[in-house]
Image (cartoon, helix red, strand yellow):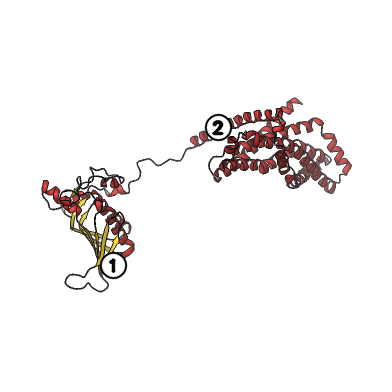
Amino acid sequence: MALCRLRGGAAGHCHQKAHPGGSLPAGQHRHLCRLRPPVGAKRGAGGHGSHHGAGQGPETKGFAGRGFSEIELLGLAPGNDEGQSDRVTRQADAAAETVVDITGEKGGDLRLSLKGPVCLDNFSQVQESLQSLWSRLQPRSLTLDLGQVGYLDSAGALILVEFQAQARERRVPLEVKGLSPRLRDVLEIIHPEGLAQPSLRPAPQPPDFVSLMGQGFLSFVQDFIELHIFLGELLFALGRACRHPGEVRWSEVLLTMKRMGLDGLPILSLMSVLLGMVIAFMSALQLQQFGATLYVASLVSISMVKELGPILTAILVAGRSGSAFAAEIGTMQVNEEVDALLVMGFDPLGFLAVPKVLASVLVVPILTVYASFFGILGGLMVGVALLDLTLYTYVNESYLVLTVFDIVTTLLKVAVFGVTIAAIGCQRGFKVRGGAEAVGIQTTSAVVASLFMIIVIDSVFAVVLHYAR
């Protein structure tokens, strides 16, 4: 016989027992598990555990979390008369020892006999004994004998009903024997369908088209308001920087200019040359039909200087630098470095955002001139190589078609692009809340919002400049 400590402070004895009148058939064993009530169980008259119904006192709280109140913890001891003697008998039965008798062979037909009380006091012990049977013995069929159950309350009934449900799930035939009318009355307290009943809270329904449109519109309005509030605060910070230029971190401005401009020249040069070559080649295919290949130079020059050069530069800066601004400030938010700046008395906008905005205003126009030049150069390569245009003819045509007004308005437009890209990147970075996932979300949002605003600003400039000229 081995003494084993069970969960909940109860002790149990498990041993193999010889079959009365002789040994069991070959391969069959009989297992006895004796389960005692917890050591701290409340005692009633005569030293026995007492119940209010089937249990009272603090023991009922452990089971109340399962959805049962103290009033619901009813218990019946079969075969007793009503009255004071019946209550004393129930108390004695509840404090008695529980025996789980399993007869049979592993993987075959098993007979399971419960002897003694099955109640709240030994709830966890009986439940563990029955649930371990599935993995330990893997029965093919089961016979559950309740004829010697001395006491059963609603907690014990829950164990038995759950055991029956598990047998149905595993498709193991289960036959219940020895079920007296009084035990059946207690078992009827538990409704099997209630164990698998879904939550009373209705399942969330997927939003319809109107809801999605409304949520998207409200989100857009909220972002629009937050962005303009940030722009207002940023303008105050820039005004302070103009009044007190010594407070600006010019070393950070130069470092940001290097990262935005010098580090991006190779990819910008390649993209501009290829774009100029494509425009020249595609336009030449159409102009050759009219013998007007000379106008390829003017077409490439106007498109690169007024539209494609600024748009290409702004998209590249938004993808490289705008996302970097959002990720940098967002990571500082996650690491609480922005809060540290506030504690030390620094203005986060002046310390972090102003250098990036100043660098963008200075670098983006320079990059636009660079991109426009390489775009015209790409068109020149196609014109000289394929269209029999001379170098002088191409350059002269480009010079004649471009005006100072076109160049100045383009530089003004790309300066606005630079402020917008830097402001959106910084605003999305300051908006980060949470962890690394939030940094990624806001970084993506910064790029998307920057591209959207670039197209909007370009459209506004196109309309305004058309009527202003």
In front here: 309 or 342? 342
**How many labels were placed on the picture?**
2
Question: The residue tagged with tag 1: helix, strand or loop?
Answer: loop
Label annotation for residue 108: 1
Residue 7 position in % (x across, y down) = 31, 56
Question: The residue tagged with tag 2: helix, strand or loop?
Answer: helix
What's the residue at 16%, 54% (across, down)?
180
* Residue 401 in view, yes or no: yes
Few, some or many residues within 10 Å of mark 2 (<14, 14–19, 20+): few
User: Disc 2 versus disc 1: distance between alpha carbons?
Assistant: 67 Å
Going from N to C along the chain, the mark reached first, 2 or 1, is 1
In front here: 218 or 183? 183
| Quarter placement of the C terminus | top right
In front here: 205 or 49? 49
Residue 296 position in % (x across, y down) = 81, 41
Q: Is residue 142 above or below residue 254?
A: below
| Quarter placement of the N terminus | bottom left
Q: Are marks 2 and 1 in contact (CB under 8 Å)?
A: no
Few, some or many residues within 10 Å of mark 1 (<14, 14–19, 20+): some
Q: Which quadrant of the structure image shows residue 165?
A: bottom left
Residue 76 position in % (x across, y down) = 17, 50
Farthest top residue? Answer: 468
Amino acid at the residue labelled 1? Gly
Q: Along the horizontal axis of the image, is 262 left or right of 78?
A: right
In front here: 139 or 6? 6
Amino acid at the residue labelled 2? Gln
What's the residue at 32%, 60% (across, down)?
132
What's the residue at 53%, 42% (across, down)?
434
Residue at numbered disc 2:
222
